[in-house]
Image (cartoon, grey):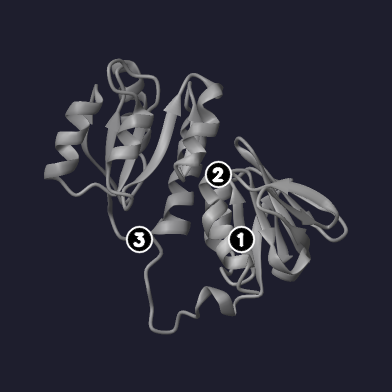
Amino acid sequence: MQNQKNISCLIVDDEAIARDVIATHISKIENVTIVKSCSNAMEAFNIIRTHTIDLLFLDINMPEISGISLARSINKNIKIIFTTAYRDYAVEGFELQAVDYLLKPISFERLLQSINTYFEVYHQPKTTNEKPLESNSFMFVRSDRRMIKIDFETIIYIESFSDYIKIHLKNEIIVTRETISAIEAKLPNNQFLRIHRSYIISIAYINSFTNEHVVINHKALTISRSYKKEVLERLERY
């Protein structure tokens, strides 16, 4: 991660061992500074109020105030990587647009992958020669140890499964270990639409829609309550 701007992070976990593991991993990564490591949400909230925090490593299952509750109360510019021993919390985590969701015990390789995702999606330096995202016609994703080029026009819809997503194309399905929020950030906004925590659709492939579902490539996908207003407003403009 050479030439990257430094980021400031906060570790929040009620288990001292878990905090130490994350801190040890982060100490090996350039351009990442630990501002503080704390054991509860209230302490974290006070630190966030008095320090500039870019990235939060946040345990979900904590006493008194959960990580989910803390995440809902802080500035949305602070990005979150959730850490937990319980896979059951994944859905709530991704509803909050988390960068990633790490299951304990957390390996260095898996944490590094999350940091790289943060840098790629949220922390790229701006240049005067940078083209708008809408001018791109493709993206690359990692699958089966290869970087695969995917043309946006071939994507029908994208489906999330915890740490993985399925990209449904015209003639195949690409599976990649990525968060749906990270992929969403790479897509041109005028061609794609998030309709659910688990679905992003290509507007061009919509067959029909109601207040509850979008039928795309003859498959009905649910519009979730949290996305309904934005989805219907956009679709009714066409």
Question: Label 3 amino acid?
Answer: Gln
Picture layout, residue 205 above or below residue 79: below
Q: CA distance from mark 2 to mark 1?
A: 15 Å
Percent x, y of residue 87: 55, 23
Drawn side of residue 110 relative to residue 154, left or right: left
- The answer to which quarter of the image holds residue 209 is bottom right
Q: In the image, 193: left or right of 144?
A: left
> Can the viewer see residue 75?
yes
Residue holding disc 1: 193
Would you call the spot at circle 2 few (<14 residues within 10 Å), some (14-19), or many (20 or more)?
Answer: few
Q: Position of residue 179 (x, y in %)?
A: 56, 45
Residue receiving disc 3: 4
Say which label, 2 or 3, has the lower sequence index.
3
Residue shown at 41% from the left, 64% from the top = 124
Front disc: 2 or 3: 2
- Amino acid carrying label 1: it is Leu
Image: 167 above or below 193: above
Query: From the image, which quarter does the C terminus lie in?
Result: bottom right
Q: Quadrant of the N terminus?
A: bottom left
What's the mark number on residue 225? Answer: 2
The answer to whether residue 109 of the structure is visible from this angle is no
Amino acid type shown at disc 2: Arg
Residue nearer the viewer, 88 or 150: 88
Furthest residue in direction front, as rendered = 211
Q: Position of residue 82 (x, y in %)?
A: 42, 33
Helix, strand or loop at disc 1?
A: strand
Local SS, label 3: loop
